[in-house]
Image (cartoon, helix red, strand yellow):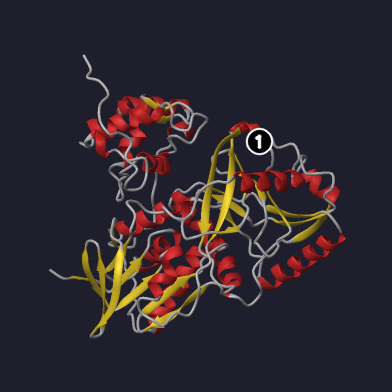
Amino acid sequence: MERNYDVLIVGCGIIGAAVAFELSKYDLKVGVLEKGNDVSLGTTKANSAIIHAGYDPESGSLMAKLNVRGSELAAEICEKLDVPYKRNGAMVVAFNEDEEQTLKGLLTRGTVNGVKGLRILTGDEARMREKNLSKDVVAALFAPTSAIVSPWEYCLALAETAIRNGVELHLNTEVKNIEREDERWKVTTGEGEFFAPHIVNAAGVDAIAIHDMVAEPKYVSKPRRGEYFLLDKSEGSRTEHTVFQCPNEDGKGVLVTPTVHGNLLVGPNSSEVAWEDTANTTEGLNFVREKARKSIDSIMFNKSIRNFAGVRATTNHHDFIIEEAAPGFIDCAGICSPGLSAAPAIAEYVAGLMEKSGLSLERKENFIFERKRIRFNELSDEEKAELVKEKPAYGRVICRCETVTEGEIMACFDEPIPPVSIDGIKRRVGTGMGRCQGGFCGPRISELFVEDRGFDVKDVLQDRAGSEMFTGKTKEGR
């Protein structure tokens, strides 16, 4: 049986999810093809988690236009879809006169781009806002509209809402080939063939390879790795704002920022790598540590609870690549920073391109734009007691570090995209994000997969396919 759609989206990171969410507002049959066993498994789950204000991109670029618009949309989307989000503001700090001139240039550029509230502070004014800021800071650009977000929850919320509005998600479905057949595209995957007259290529670091399946090569992929420190919540108040250093040829530089979960995030560096090489390196982490201490020298890196790295989908083109590469085939390639910030605006832009390409966009009357999650540790004592009385599973704490209950874990199994791995649960409810990094809750979550979801113990995964946790029993129980 042929599987036919009006639109197929390749990839379900933040861009694919945002496009699916946007198109689910219309009377269309939309399918999403994701090679992983979950959404947000690429760059989306391993980045700086910043909703940028929009002063950095070159004026007139797609990055500039879509960053500012996306930042505006993100606040409403996160509120409606119950995604952790905080508008904490950002500072770009300068250490000498040359960097002060860079700040003035960013101020001018940001003003042209439409960023609101930008102003330059003296070093003393900056330290009045951030008491731990280095005494060597002589000035700072203040951007009050910058925000922090939980990127994987943002992606998941968009994807879940799209599904609630009729979009069909196909996980573990890697695209092998795309070819033109009459007036439509035939997409061959490891799970069979799919057909649609319109395709959106949102494949992240694989986007150039997907493009080359349907059109002459035009761009070159140059993925870059960024390495990070995630510090304990005891360091989470080290800074209130996101603190950047002046941007350079490698990007926005090493930043120090609180996270929406109460930790401190420090990074990244920037090194060109082959595809999805997310290994941490001594050299890279030493670089991050040294640079970060230039901004805030009191950071206690011995409070680090995890290091990680993400790969950015950069290319030889210094802007987003969002264009029709072939009839009905829209590329979303080179979506590096500020891609997370721009995502909902990118989705709007893509929908407009598709309409020009012949896609009929008729609004639904019953579009669902709401989502609510129970976070037990955010409830009042009275609310907790009432919830446990009604649903006793919420009274059993599985993750002690983050106070996540069995009830929250079981609830996420009933959502439109149920988790299939320990890290999948982590991204949904926060288990394993504390000091012990899953040392306590991991075994119990594995038991839930076996006892409540019917998994064979040897099929319990840490994250992606192939990350099995167990090979078998070492001894029989009594």
Which quadrant does the C terminus fall into? Answer: top left
Residue 21: give x, y in percent of width and height: 38, 63
* Front-most of residues 386 and 4: 4
For the question of whether residue 27 can be seen, the reply is: no
Q: Secondary structure at mark 1?
A: helix
Instruction: Say left or right for 360 vs 230.
Output: left
Residue type at mark 1?
A: Phe
* Front-most of residues 276 and 28: 276
Task: Residue under label 1, please give it.
Answer: 301
Q: Identify which residue is drawn at 40% across, 29% down.
A: 441
Q: Identify which residue is drawn at 21% across, 69% down.
A: 193
| Residue located farthest toward the left when viewing the structure as drawn | 1
Residue 80: give x, y in percent of width and height: 45, 53
* Front-most of residues 81 and 223: 223
Residue 163: give x, y in percent of width and height: 30, 58
Q: Identify which residue is drawn at 41% across, 82% down.
A: 216
Residue 114: give x, y in percent of width and height: 66, 70
Instruction: Say left or right for 308 vs 451.
Output: right
For the question of whether residue 12 can be seen, the reply is: yes
Which quadrant does the N terminus fall into? Answer: bottom left
Instruction: Say left or right for 413 vs 4.
Output: right
- Tell me the quarter of the picture where residue 65 sits: bottom right
465 versus 384 height, above or below: below
270 versus 409 height, above or below: below
